[in-house]
Image: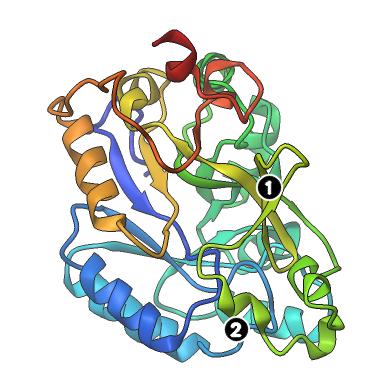
């Protein structure tokens, strides 16, 4: 049965969106085993050319995390471009150990056809109770709200879903650069004037993505291979109460290369009601945003506007 929306808010560590070295992945998840997160997503969800980590590697990490009491989910690739991608997807869905996060309809079809439960990724664009109900009947137990959906809109959506007997749990993207778009072109390779199929894996030089700035030097987007992310980092640690009040049961934290242990600790404190109020005089080095959640343009930081 899906976890109920009135249960304590759980924390999920999303899949690493960037391209790291094997050593960095290994160390990150060794550390994560001791963090107060309930769910950990594993796998390469962005680019099929990132082959340092094989399915067996992810399964090995998953087993270790499961022994630490974590719920482990394997994330599928969001943009399927070839028969080779489909073969890898079939192996992922048929892993026989862990639930899969379906990030496109190919994964949904594979899981549904095999009678496997799955998590619906944000890229499925589930905006209404009818669509959520269709996928729940296909085996979806939890879904990710679209990243641009406001808290008010999500509250209405989940209330409508409950009225229609839809019980799938909901997850909110609470921290990290927001995934906005995917393309068959690799923008990071293009930045280095390299063709996509001979990219030399230049995205590995940027463990938190490549900033794309406007003429006014504002970080508008973050380039991550074929994926475009927000320039600012979404940070809803002071909105945890409203996430729970909306009816969502999981807050997703997207991994970053540095300082993730502190981020997790703050969200854990927030869900227990122990996070200190933000100091309006504190200087914030990195740009953060929370506009979408508050029904504003996504790049806005509403607390900065009200301080």
The residue positioned 62% from the left and 50% from the top of the image is: 138
Which secondary structure lies at badge 1? strand
Query: 88 or 147, which lies in front?
Result: 147
Q: In the rendered view, does 18 fall on the left or right side of 2? A: right
Q: Where residue 11 sits: x, y (%)?
A: 30, 45
Mark 2 or 1: the one toward you: 1
Q: Is residue 176 above or below residue 170?
A: below
Q: CA distance from mark 2 to mark 1?
A: 33 Å
Q: In the rendered view, does 118 fall on the left or right side of 42? A: right
Which secondary structure lies at badge 2? helix
Tell which residue pokes out farthest to the top in this image.
306
Task: Name the N-terminal-most of marks 2 and 1.
Answer: 2
Q: Which label belongs to residue 91?
A: 2
Q: Where residue 278 sits: x, y (%)?
A: 27, 23
Q: Residue 260 lies in what quarter of the image?
A: bottom left
Which quadrant does the N terminus fall into? top left
Q: Which label belongs to residue 221?
A: 1
Q: In the rendered view, does 275 fall on the left or right side of 142? A: left
The residue positioned 51% from the left and 24% from the top of the image is: 301
Q: Is residue 169 visible?
A: no
Q: Where residue 31 sits: x, y (%)?
A: 22, 70
Q: Residue 298 lies in what quarter of the image?
A: top right
Tell which residue pokes out farthest to the front in this image.
216
């Amino acid at each position: 049965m899906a976890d109920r929306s009135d249960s304590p808010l759980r924390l999920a560590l999303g899949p690493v969106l960037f391209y790291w070295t094997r050593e960095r992945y290994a160390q990150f998840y060794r550390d994560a085993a001791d963090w107060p997160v309930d769910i950990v997503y594993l796998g390469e969800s962005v680019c099929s050319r990132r082959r340092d980590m094989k399915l067996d590697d992810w399964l090995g990490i998953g087993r270790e995390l499961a022994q630490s009491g974590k719920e482990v989910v394997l994330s599928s690739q969001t943009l399927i471009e070839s028969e080779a991608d489909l073969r890898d997807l079939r192996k992922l869905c048929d892993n026989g150990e862990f639930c899969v996060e379906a990030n496109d309809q190919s994964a949904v079809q594979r899981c549904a056809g095999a009678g496997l439960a799955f998590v619906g990724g944000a890229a499925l664009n589930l905006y209404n109770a009818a669509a959520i109900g269709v996928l729940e009947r296909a085996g979806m137990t939890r879904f990710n709200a679209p990243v641009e959906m406001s808290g008010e809109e999500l509250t209405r959506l989940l209330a409508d879903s409950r009225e229609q007997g839809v019980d799938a749990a909901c997850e909110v993207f609470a921290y990290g650069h927001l995934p906005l778009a995917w393309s068959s072109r690799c923008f990071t390779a293009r930045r280095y004037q390299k063709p996509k199929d001979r990219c030399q894996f230049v995205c590995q030089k940027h463990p938190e993505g490549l900033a794309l700035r406007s003429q006014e030097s504002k970080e508008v987007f973050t380039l991550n291979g074929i994926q475009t992310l927000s320039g600012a980092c979404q940070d809803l640690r002071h909105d945890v109460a409203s996430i729970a009040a909306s009816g969502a049961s999981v807050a997703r934290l997207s991994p970053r290369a540095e300082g993730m242990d502190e981020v997790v600790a703050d969200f854990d404190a927030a869900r227990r009601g122990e996070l200190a109020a933000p100091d309006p005089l504190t200087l914030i080095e990195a740009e953060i945003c929370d506009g979408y959640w508050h029904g504003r343009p996504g790049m806005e930081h509403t607390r900065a506007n009200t301080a």
